[in-house]
Image: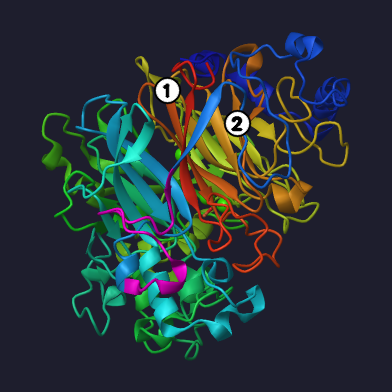
Amino acid sequence: MTDVIRGQKTLDAIIRQRRMTRRDFLRASGAVGFGAAAFSLTGCAPMAKEKALYEGSLTFREIAKGDLIKPLVPEGYLLDVLVRWGDALDAQVPFDPTALTARDQETRFGYNNDYLAFMPMQWGSDNSQHGLLCVNHEYTNLRLMFPGMTLDEEMDKVTEEQTRIEQASLGCSVVEIRKETTGWQVVSGSIYSRRLHANTPMKISGPAAGDKRMQTAEDALGILAKGTFANCAGGVTPWGTVLTAEENIHTFFTEYEAKGKKDPEARNHKRMGIGMERYYRWEVVDERFDSNAHPHEPNRFGWIVEYDPYRPEKPPVKRTALGRFKHECANTTLTPDGRVAIYSGDDEMFEYVYRFITKGKYNPNDREANDGLLDEGTLYVAKFNASGMVEWLPLVYGQGPLTKKNGFHSQADVLIETRYAAELMGATPMDRPEDVEVNARTGQLFIALTKNTKRAEGEENEANRRGPNPYGHILELSPPLKGDMPDHSADMFFWNVFLEGGDPINPTHHAYYQHYVSQHGWLTNPDNLAFDKQGRIWIATDGQPDAIGMCDGLYAADTEGKGKGSTRLFFNAPRGAEVTGPAFTPDCTTLFISVQHPGDFPLKSTYDAPSTRWPDFRDDMPPRPAVVAITKEDGKVIGS
Ligand code: FEO
Ligand code: CA
Ligand code: CA
Ligand code: CA
């Protein structure tokens, strides 16, 4: 346990620590900036002074920030490309994007891999040599997938077959992998390998299942959805199923035109941005994506989907009790009495952070008995109070403002319009909540807030201190202890700022780090988080090309001691790519990273003239999103 959790008895000290005034905060960031400035001109060469300043546990030699056409890892580490968009899951069939069909894509690794979960074979073991890699596929980049189109032309030039390929390339992939003497390999023809995509049948369960707002022409009962897409991050349940989060679902539908003041979906579709920021023409091949003809179809997306990678015959299930919004993730932990707590961020500027607590308890002795556990429970939203605490507010029909007066007639309504319910309850608008994940070693909860360029000066709040905030920040929440365990069911947690991104030597960034960071170690736009078994945080970034003109990266830092928050750059993504889904094997000797949208920057980059051709570097192959496996030459723990 960390000192902060233990320090519940010294509440005043915690509040004092957290409630830095703006002036204190600037002074603190300036002080850290001075430290970094003293060493900013010495590059990434080993630095005696740098070594003296860095007091954390990480021993890798930090790499340099850069603009590179392929990934970079520290000296002494090996990087293997494990699986790429288009790789066949069932046999070694070569990939030719120009000959690809939608049916073919359904048997191949999907596009724009995001979340990764390494599920050991068998479940319950800590096998770090053999497992199922569960992968999300978030969105498509037509101009990089197919020849002959630029970004501006995508919507006009996309063919019907390419649209169907898009539908087949999103969702999830389950890939059986094994570590051979030659490195990690995909097991060909595995009985576990499968794809979930935009047309895979899946059940709808929980309080919104069967509600009239979930019923459509194809599904009169409102209990069977077709497909999942926009799958961003996710989580793993204690019983070994995977949760996949449906995030930017609004881009897939036509814009909704409200039908008068009494239109029951007008408020809902507006708040979810249905049809805004469109990248797709899916309604051309599948009428259900016409939100005006099928106004309930969008209500069947924006959920958390649970699937069992070990039982491919079981259909995935949309668990509506966890609410509907632009779910970034669904990370789980246990409460002291054995219930399950699940955290999720709603990734949009000024949206909220959520927690779900199951009604029932996890059964560790019977895996199947946990099927349906996520269908009953309470969804909460976070309010960061001026008192220095975060309060979890329940979103329950009939309680507080969640009544008929505000258009809620059932818990199904509360869940379908989670955002509005949260707003009425007084939740704190955040700077784009991305991963919300528990450090299993300490029980503390970390929230990555990627940025908020729309927050005006004067609109800052306790937990989002910069307006505007182009660089993002990370919060650290501490639940109180119950016995020896952090109580993730408590109504109030303590919180603190872990870091505020940006360059600590640039006074206009107002960055904040708790300890020393080098010129390469500071970061912006934190997105996915992972924790290794030593409790260190690994932070993937999304947006550094825009924010600071640098490639995205993966950074690591201690979460305790003198290296707390001393971020160090471990992995530099290839040009245009975002780093997503960091996941360790149980023994932490392999780190899997999802390299999403390589070549996506600058925006003029296309299939025909991409800004990188990683990972194939063949003239007839575009850049391909891919998962890489990183190991240490000496076989020891990553980061050591
Ligand atoms: Fe898909 Fe919130 O990143
Ligand atoms: Ca993300
Ligand atoms: Ca994560
Ligand atoms: Ca993101």
Front-most of residues 529 and 484: 529
Q: Is residue 182 above or below residue 292?
A: above
Looking at numbered disc 2 in the image, what kind of residue is underneath it? Val
**Residue in the image at 84% along x and 20% along y:** 35
Separation of residues labelled 2 and 1 (CA atoms): 15 Å
* Dot placed on the residue nearer the N-terminal end, 2 or 1: 2
Quarter the N terminus occupies: top left
Residue that mark 1 sits on: 589
Q: Is residue 489 magenta?
A: no
Q: Position of residue 108 (x, y in %)?
A: 34, 59
- Look at the magenta stretch and give its main secondary structure: loop
Q: Is residue 91 magenta?
A: yes
Q: Position of residue 398 (x, y in %)?
A: 35, 60
Read off the magenta span.
Answer: 82-102
**Residue in the image at 24% along x and 42% along y:** 359
Residue that mark 2 sits on: 73
Q: Is residue 638 above or below residue 612?
A: above
Quarter of the image holding residue 215?
bottom left
Looking at numbered disc 1 in the image, what kind of residue is underneath it? Thr
Q: Position of residue 134 (x, y in %)?
A: 33, 46
Circle 2: element type: loop
Tell me if 560 is positioned left or right of 265 in this view.
right
Q: Is residue 5 above or below residue 358?
A: above
